[in-house]
């Protein structure tokens, strides 16, 4: 999801005309992205397209690949830090949100489009007495983001639920991937990080099917309530990107940042949470620069004190210089 400062989108007049014909007033210029991110941070996108169906998502991606344009797909805007300078390219806002539960077989499943809110899917499963996604009830992002980033919590993660996903590949077209093809690692997959030097994703997640287990609404809801209560006790409210760093092997990023004496540290309107040090909070008008200064401080302090290099769990999005 990283576009360097030297890259920009390139759309011929014919390409721009095709986008305008397809999306009309859902194609906009110089749109501030703060309103579309969980942290309420982010400069403008040169162009923003709102795709409200899988067919429109396919249409936008294929046209932009044909034009060799720089673009990225944005879902719920969690786990991303959009630069203050914004995105020199096209942002495709994924609003394809259809969800369908299939319970007529012994092994129930849920199929959903990638723009569907993952937490909402989990809560809809609970109402139907379907277990397996209780861990996801508090996750704010979309299904597509969860598939790409191997989202997880409370001992569960996407690699344990995903059956298949429909993918639109730049070169091979639409295809179906098994969970093994994502090569899932801790909070990562083969699709999470775009290849160096590229300005567009290699593939776009369109839809996914997840495995579920028959249970009862009270039992599933009780487990969700337990997880949500734990989340409220241990994670701060307010605008944030979610967990900032991956947990290093055998330890926790939040513990290390706290042990480095940084809990509550502020830069501008950004703060390392006083409740959980792996969450960086927008106190009201934080900039991406404020947050990135805290990222650098946390990395440097933990490295100096413990000799551990923290890897970002979030993605840096947009026009950054020497991040």
Image (spheres, rainbow, N blue to C red):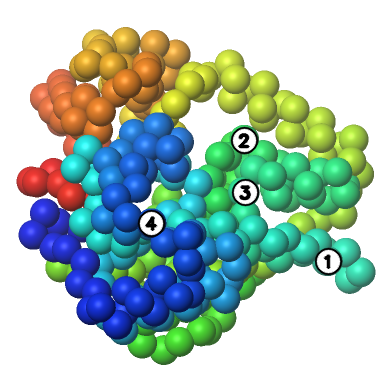
Which of pointers 4 and 2 lies earlier in the amino acid sequence? 4
Badges 1 and 2: C-beta atoms under 8 Å apart?
no
The x, y position of residue 60, in whole percent, is: 43, 73
Residue in the image at 39% along x and 26% along y = 279
Which of pointers 1 and 4 lies earlier in the amino acid sequence? 4
Q: Image height check: is 243 above or below 175?
A: above
Which of pointers 3 and 4 lies earlier in the amino acid sequence? 4
Q: Image height check: is 71 above or below 268?
A: below
* Distance (Cα) linking label 4 and label 2: 31 Å
Q: Image height check: is 116 above or below 138?
A: below
* Distance (Cα) linking label 1 and label 2: 23 Å
Q: What element carries label 4?
A: strand
Badges 3 and 4: C-beta atoms under 8 Å apart?
no
Give left or right: position of 301 versus 215.
left
Q: Is mark 3 on a helix, strand or loop?
A: helix
The x, y position of residue 149, in whole percent, is: 44, 54
Badges 3 and 1: C-beta atoms under 8 Å apart?
no
Q: Name the residue under label 4.
A: 28
Q: What element carries label 2?
A: loop
Q: Name the residue under label 2.
A: 138
Please indicate, yes or no, whether residue 181 appears anywhere in the rendered image: no
Q: Quadrant of residue 307?
A: top left
Q: Mark 1 points at which residue?
A: 102
- Residue 118, label in figure: 3
* Distance (Cα) linking label 3 and label 1: 17 Å
- Nearer the observer: mark 3 or 4; the answer is 4
Which of pointers 1 and 2 lies earlier in the amino acid sequence? 1
* Distance (Cα) linking label 3 and label 4: 27 Å
């Amino acid at each position: 999801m990283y576009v360097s400062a030297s890259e920009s989108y390139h759309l011929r007049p014919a390409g721009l005309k095709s986008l305008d014909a397809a999306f009309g007033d859902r194609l906009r210029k110089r749109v501030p992205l703060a309103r579309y991110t969980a942290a309420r941070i982010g400069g403008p996108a040169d162009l923003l397209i709102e795709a409200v169906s899988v067919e429109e998502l396919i249409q936008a991606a294929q046209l932009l690949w044909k034009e060799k344009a720089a673009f990225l797909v944005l879902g719920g805007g969690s786990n991303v830090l959009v630069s203050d300078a914004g995105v020199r390219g096209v942002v495709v806002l994924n609003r394809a949100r259809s969800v369908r539960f299939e319970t007529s077989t012994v092994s129930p499943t849920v199929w959903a489009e990638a723009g569907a809110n993952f937490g909402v899917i989990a809560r809809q499963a609970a109402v139907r007495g379907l277990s397996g996604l209780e861990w996801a009830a508090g996750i704010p992002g979309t299904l597509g983001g969860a598939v790409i980033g191997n989202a997880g919590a409370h001992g569960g993660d996407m690699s344990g639920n995903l059956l298949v996903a429909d993918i639109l590949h730049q070169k091979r077209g639409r295809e179906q991937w098994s969970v093994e093809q994502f090569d899932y690692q801790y909070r990562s997959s083969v699709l999470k990080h775009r290849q160096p030097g590229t300005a567009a994703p290699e593939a776009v997640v369109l839809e996914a099917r997840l495995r579920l287990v028959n249970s009862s609404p009270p039992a599933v809801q009780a487990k969700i309530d337990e997880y949500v209560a734990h989340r409220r006790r241990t994670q701060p409210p307010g605008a944030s990107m979610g967990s900032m760093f991956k947990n290093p092997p055998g330890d926790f990023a939040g513990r290390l940042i706290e042990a480095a004496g940084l809990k509550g540290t502020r830069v501008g309107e950004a703060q390392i949470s006083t409740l959980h040090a792996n969450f960086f909070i927008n106190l009201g008008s934080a900039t991406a620069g404020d947050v990135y200064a805290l990222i650098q401080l946390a990395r440097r302090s933990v490295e100096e004190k413990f000799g551990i290099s923290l890897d970002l769990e979030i993605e840096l999005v947009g026009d950054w210089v020497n991040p």
